[in-house]
Every structure is written in structure tokens, then in C-alpha cells.
């Protein structure tokens, strides 16, 4: 699949979603346009863009743009590091309020440094804890940001 | 009061000890984020938003603006010395700047870059000082039809000025407008696309979207690449350019100021576009254009001046019309809104102390930046010795805390991550996220103006060509639209050549 075709699928899906939920909104009349008018116009424009790029993307796939196709394969190959980061960040968001900033941030940094950056376990631990404590002090004490206290009540 | 007495009043505000300190912090932080690849002005501004909560609005905007124009100065340093653009506007500077470094003239390139940035920045502030109040006075006469027409021009321009073609940019604009429609309808109170999630009733926050798309997305892209960094050292004695280099730089610096100022007024990636246009102009005007790309000082002076001039003029539509032209001014606008100040036509007359204090601080900031960027360049370069594998987790953590600090909402953290993923894929597909973000901000005002105008005219579209202002603006937007569509579908030189070859 070419990059343009992948993008066209995104536009089509967003357009379909927008269209489906827009038609459930009141449309009103021209002298009093309802809340559904603007979103439905945008959804139709997105659908048109999606269909156009789907057709144009196919033409490119067979012809002059073979390198773009290879580029898309590269994306899949390179996906492992971003996937790890996304997964770890999602975990951080889930536990952030429950365990508190200090514990969550230290854990987050430790996993990233050890698993993604491939530092040794001791180095990762020392770096994670010191950056965690330093950032907590900077945000909580200097910038007075309200961060969740969690388990450590800090 | 005239401009000069207002400016004098602004200097009184800006020269308070606290505001000088805040201006310095902004410039310092801006230079640092400009130097470090992966953190641009947008992330730099967002990270310091929590620090502004305890400040008054003047202090807050002085510091945040300092980061914005400071990043433009800092971005050139890594481009010249390492061939790594610190931020997107400095990509063009890499071409000749790094070649100059390889020839042992890196110091002169840094000097001319800082000097050009200073002149471009200062001239642009003078333009901002004169033009913003005039534009705001003019915009006071705007009703919903005029506002809709202005925004229509902005959207068509946005489509044509994105990094991709018009047809690639417009779907991103439509997506941004649709995302901007999420939440409670301002006229009827109906809920749109909220799916009974209370966090969506007020719409999706701009900060998590901007930070996710531009900050987290960039990090995800950057972790795929391994950056081989070779840092060239520059001695203080090597900073001075030769007489010939100085003479060759004056023209590009003044042309770059004009180009940057004009392009900065337009929505889109103005600072990136301005540096590119300036480079192409210098190349076209040069007696020996073939030497460009091999270390010409004009290839550094013009683009670096232009991107700084653009950062000053980009503040004009944002401050006087309430229309941000890029993601970074948009985040500054959010910061002002947090402080209870709405940028727009009434901003300058209602808050002259904030506006003129900001203008005066920008003059001060430019002086601070030239001092920071020349003798202290070595200190900033040493920041690059921090390995990226330590830097990226810290940047991610700061993005998360910066987003959380505004509303203490974990929902916004989820939005940040979601838009980070979206930003990653969009970048991979060679599309640009900036038009989506801008459309998201301006979209609600555009919709409201359109609906209010139609209500006022009892449903008649003739309201859009009743006044000369709307008529002109609608005509301009239609002409731009036709031109862009033509540009998108006309056969290119390559396709003509291919067709010719096939016919033989």
C-alpha cells in the first residue's frame, strides 16, 4: 500500500465517522443553521479527499512511485521502537494518578532507559531516579504544578 | 498617544527587574530548545506554560515570546556547526552554513547568522509595532461576515502554504476543522461527537493536540534514526567575518528582513517558508549561483534573517485579529487566554500595557540574544553532548507534565498520546500536521461567523458581497483557490518530457 493510499483510508474513515454522527444532529434552515451543517460539509469534503487520494494513490503504486511503496514497508520495519514508547507511555498514563508523579515518572524513565535506550540496569535505575526526583522538585516545588501525590504522598 | 509614547510606556513595563529576568529566561530557554534537535519553539513554550501561572499576563507573554524568537536564533547554531537543524526553519541554513564550517569559516557564519537575526528581528518588531494597532483598529469594524471572509482567505492560504501540495494540505485542514467542531455547539448548546464523555464537552484541548502531534510525534520519528553527531569547535577569535563576507551579507540581510516580514503574516509554516524563499531569492540574484551549496555567506545571511523577521510579523495577526498563523503563536494565544486575556481587535486598546510591554521586551530580547548567541555559543553547543537516548525520555516526560499541568487531566494525556501516534503516521505519510492544528483553532470562530452572518441576513448568502471588505476578501480567496487547483492539476515539466518521449 502506498503512503497516499494509507492517508486516503484515514481521510475516508474520518469522513465516514463525521458523516454518520453529523446526520444525527439538527441541520436547521439557512436562516438559522443548525449544529450539524458545518460538520456534515467537512465530512463530505473529507470523503471526497479520501476517494481522490485512494484513486491517485493506486495510480502511483503501479507506476513512477515505487520507492514510496518501499518506504511504507520501512515504516513497518521501524515500528518496534515507537511501539515500545507508545506502550510505555500508555502505561504511565494509566498508573500516573494512582501511584503518583514521583513513582510513575521514575518507573517510566527506568523502563524507557533500560528497554528502549538499552542502558545497563544500574545506569538506568540511577538516571531514572535522579531525573524523576529532579523533575519532581522542579515542577512541584519551583513551578508549583499540582501533581498527583499517589503512594508516596509526595 | 502616538507610537513612541506608547513604546516609552512599554519600556517602563519591560524594564522592571522581574520582566527583564523573565525576558532573559525566555531567550535563554528559547536558545536552548533551538539548539537541541527534537525540541522546537512549540515544545519549549508549552513546557514553560506552567511556570507562567504565578505571573501576571505581561510577564507571561514576555517570557513565552522570548522562547519563540530565541529558538530561531538557536536553531542556526547546530545547522552551521553540525549539519543538524535545531528546528525546522534552519534546514536551509545547513546547506551553506555547514559547508562554511568545513572550510573553517563556521565562526563567521555564526556571526552573520546572529547579526542578520538581530537586524531581521528588530526591523520586524518595528513593523509589528506600527502595523498591529492599525490592523486592530481596522478589524474593529468587522462583523461576522467580514470575520468569515478573513478566515476563508486564511484557510485557502493555509492550503497553499503547507509543506505539501494544496491537495495534500486541504484534507488535513478539513480534519482539523472537524476536530474543532467536537464539543458543545456555542449557538444551540447541542453536543457534537462527545459520545457522553464529559471531558469532550468543552472540545479537545489545543495543547495536548499540538504537543502530541508536534512533540511526541517528532520524538517517535527521531527514535527511528541514529544521529551521528560531529561537533566542530569554534574559537571566539574565529567569529569575526572578513570585510568581503560582511559586504556580501548586507543585501541578503535586508532582503531577508522584507521577505520574512511579508511571509510571516501568512498562515502556515511561515518561518520555514520564509527561509526557503530567501535562499532561492539570493541564489537567483547571485552572479555565481553555482557556488551556492558550497559555502556562500549569502546562503546563511538571507534565510536566518528571514526566519527571525517572520517570527516577529507572525505575532501581528495573532495579537490584532486573534488569528494565530502557526502552532507556536497558537500556544501563546492559549497562554494569554489562561491569563484571562483574549487576543483580537480589542486586545491592544484594552490591554496596552501587555502589548507595549511585549513590544519593548522584544527589542530587549534581541539584544540579549545576540550576546547569548555569539560569545556563549560554546556553552550551548555543549548541550549537544547529552546523548539523545537520555534526552528523549526526558522530553517525553516534560511533554506529559506540561500537558497535565494545565488542567490536571489524565484524559488530556491520553489525547496527547493519541495525537502523538497520529502525528507519527501523518509525518510518515508525508503530510503536515501544522494545518490540522491551525484549522482546529480557527475552525470554531469560522463556523460561528458563518452561522451568525446567515442568521443576520435571514439565510441570504448575499451578505458576503454586500460590503467592499467581504467582497474583496471572498474574491481573493476564490482567486487563490482557482490558482491552487490549477497549480495542483497542471502538467509538470517532467510529465511533459515523459509524454514527449513516449510519443517519439
Image: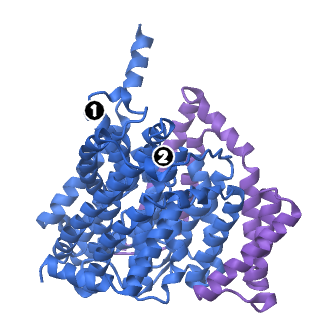
Quadrant assignment, res B139: bottom left
Judge by depth and name the residue closer to the eye, B305 or A113: B305
User: x and y percent of residue A51 in the render?
Assistant: 51, 45
Where does label 1 land, which residue?
B286
**As displayed, is residue A77 above or below residue B19?**
above
Task: Name which residue lies at 35% across and 73% down.
Answer: B445
User: x and y percent of residue B409 in the render?
Assistant: 62, 82
**As displayed, is residue A21 above or below residue A82?**
below
Q: CA distance from mark 1 to mark 2?
A: 21 Å
**As displayed, is residue B247 above or below residue B382?**
above
Q: Secondary structure at mark 2?
A: helix
Where does label 2 land, which residue?
B80
Which colouring convention does the figure follow? Answer: by chain
User: x and y percent of residue B432 in the render?
Assistant: 49, 52
What shade does chain A have? purple
Of discs 1 and 2, which sits in the foreground?
Answer: 2
> Are the residues under badges 1 and 2 in a single subunit?
yes
Name the quarter where the N terminus of chain B is drawn.
bottom left
What shade does chain B have? blue
Q: Secondary structure at mark 1?
A: loop
Residue B188, can we see it?
no
Q: Earlier in the sequence, mark 1 or mark 2?
A: 2
The residue positioned farthest toward the front in the image shown: B237
Amino acid at each position: 500500500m502506498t503512503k497516499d493510499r494509507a492517508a486516503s483510508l484515514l481521510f475516508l474513515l474520518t469522513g465516514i465517522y463525521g458523516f454518520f454522527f453529523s446526520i444525527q444532529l439538527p441541520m436547521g434552515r439557512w436562516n438559522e443553521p443548525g449544529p450539524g451543517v458545518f460538520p456534515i460539509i467537512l465530512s463530505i469534503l473529507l470523503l471526497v479527499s479520501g476517494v481522490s487520494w485512494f484513486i491517485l494513490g493506486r495510480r502511483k503504486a503501479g507506476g513512477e512511485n515505487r520507492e514510496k511503496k518501499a518506504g511504507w514497508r520501512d515504516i513497518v520495519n521501524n515500528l518496534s521502537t515507537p511501539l515500545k514508547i507508545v506502550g510505555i507511555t500508555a502505561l504511565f498514563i494509566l498508573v500516573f494518578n494512582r501511584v503518583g508523579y514521583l513513582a510513575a515518572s521514575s518507573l517510566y524513565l527506568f523502563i524507557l532507559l533500560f528497554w528502549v535506550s538499552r542502558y545497563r540496569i544500574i545506569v538506568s535505575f540511577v538516571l531514572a531516579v535522579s531525573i524523576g526526583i529532579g523533575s519532581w522538585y522542579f515542577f512541584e516545588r519551583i513551578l508549583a504544578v499540582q501533581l498527583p501525590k499517589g503512594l508516596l504522598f509526595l | 498617544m502616538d507610537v513612541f509614547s506608547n513604546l516609552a510606556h512599554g519600556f517602563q513595563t519591560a524594564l522592571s527587574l522581574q520582566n527583564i529576568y523573565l525576558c532573559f529566561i525566555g531567550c535563554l530557554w528559547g536558545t536552548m530548545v533551538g539548539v537541541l534537535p527534537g525540541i522546537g519553539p512549540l515544545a519549549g513554550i508549552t513546557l514553560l506554560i506552567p511556570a507562567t501561572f504565578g505571573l501576571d499576563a505581561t510577564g507571561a507573554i514576555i517570557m513565552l515570546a522570548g522562547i519563540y524568537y530565541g529558538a530561531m536564533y538557536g536553531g542556526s547554531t547546530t545547522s552551521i556547526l553540525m549539519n543538524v537543524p535545531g528546528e525546522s526553519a534552519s534546514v536551509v541554513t545547513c546547506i551553506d552554513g555547514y559547508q562554511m564550517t568545513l572550510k573553517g569559516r563556521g565562526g563567521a557564519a555564526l556571526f552573520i547568522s546572529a547579526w542578520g537575526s538581530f537586524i531581521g528581528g528588530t526591523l520586524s518588531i518595528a513593523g509589528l509595532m506600527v502595523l498591529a494597532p492599525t490592523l486592530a483598529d481596522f478589524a474593529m469594524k468587522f462583523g461576522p461576515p467580514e470575520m468569515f471572509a478573513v478566515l476563508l482567505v486564511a484557510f485557502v492560504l493555509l492550503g497553499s502554504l503547507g509543506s505539501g501540495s494544496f491537495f495534500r494540505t486541504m484534507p488535513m485542514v478539513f480534519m482539523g476543522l472537524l476536530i474543532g467542531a467536537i464539543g458543545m455547539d456555542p449557538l444551540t448548546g447541542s453536543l457534537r461527537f462527545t459520545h457522553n464523555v464529559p471531558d469532550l464537552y468543552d472540545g479537545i484541548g489545543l495543547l495536548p493536540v499540538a504537543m502530541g502531534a508536534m512533540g511526541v510525534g517528532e520524538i517517535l520519528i527521531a527514535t527511528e534514526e541514529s544521529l551521528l553527531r560531529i561537533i566542530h569547535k569554534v574559537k571566539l577569535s574565529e567569529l569575526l567575518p572578513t570585510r568581503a563576507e560582511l559586504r556580501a551579507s548586507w543585501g541578503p540581510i535586508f532582503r531577508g528582513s522584507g521577505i520574512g516580514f511579508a511571509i510571516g503574516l501568512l498562515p502556515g509554516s511561515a518561518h520555514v517558508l520564509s527561509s526557503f524563499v530567501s535562499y532561492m531569492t539570493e541564489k537567483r540574484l547571485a552572479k555565481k549561483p553555482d557556488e551556492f551549496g558550497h559555502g556562500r555567506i549569502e546562503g546563511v545571511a538571507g534565510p536566518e534573517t528571514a526566519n527571525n523577521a517572520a517570527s516577529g510579523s507572525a505575532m501581528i495577526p495573532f495579537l490584532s485579529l486573534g488569528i494565530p498563523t502557526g502552532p507556536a503563536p497558537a500556544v501563546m494565544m492559549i497562554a494569554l487566554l489562561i491569563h484571562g486575556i483574549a487576543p483580537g481587535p480589542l486586545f491592544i486598546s484594552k490591554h496596552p500595557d501587555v502589548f507595549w510591554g511585549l513590544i519593548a521586551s522584544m527589542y530587549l530580547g534581541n539584544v540579549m540574544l545576540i550576546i547569548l548567541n555569539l560569545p556563549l555559543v560554546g556553552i550551548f553547543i555543549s548541550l549537544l553532548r547529552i546523548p539523545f537516548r537520555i534526552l528523549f525520555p526526558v522530553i517525553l516526560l516534560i511533554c506529559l507534565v506540561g500537558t497535565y499541568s494545565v488542567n490536571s487531566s489524565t484524559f488530556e494525556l491520553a489525547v496527547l498520546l493519541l495525537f502523538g501516534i497520529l502525528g507519527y503516521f501523518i509525518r510518515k505519510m508525508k503530510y503536515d500536521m501544522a494545518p490540522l492544528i491551525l484549522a482546529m483553532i480557527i475552525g470554531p470562530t469560522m463556523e460561528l461567523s458563518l452561522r451568525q452572518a446567515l442568521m443576520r441576513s435571514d439565510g441570504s448568502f448575499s451578505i458576503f458581497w454586500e460590503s467592499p471588505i467581504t467582497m474583496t476578501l471572498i474574491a481573493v480567496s476564490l482567486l487563490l483557490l482557482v490558482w491552487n487547483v490549477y497549480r495542483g492539476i497542471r502538467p509538470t515539466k517532467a510529465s511533459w518530457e515523459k509524454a514527449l518521449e513516449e510519443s517519439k
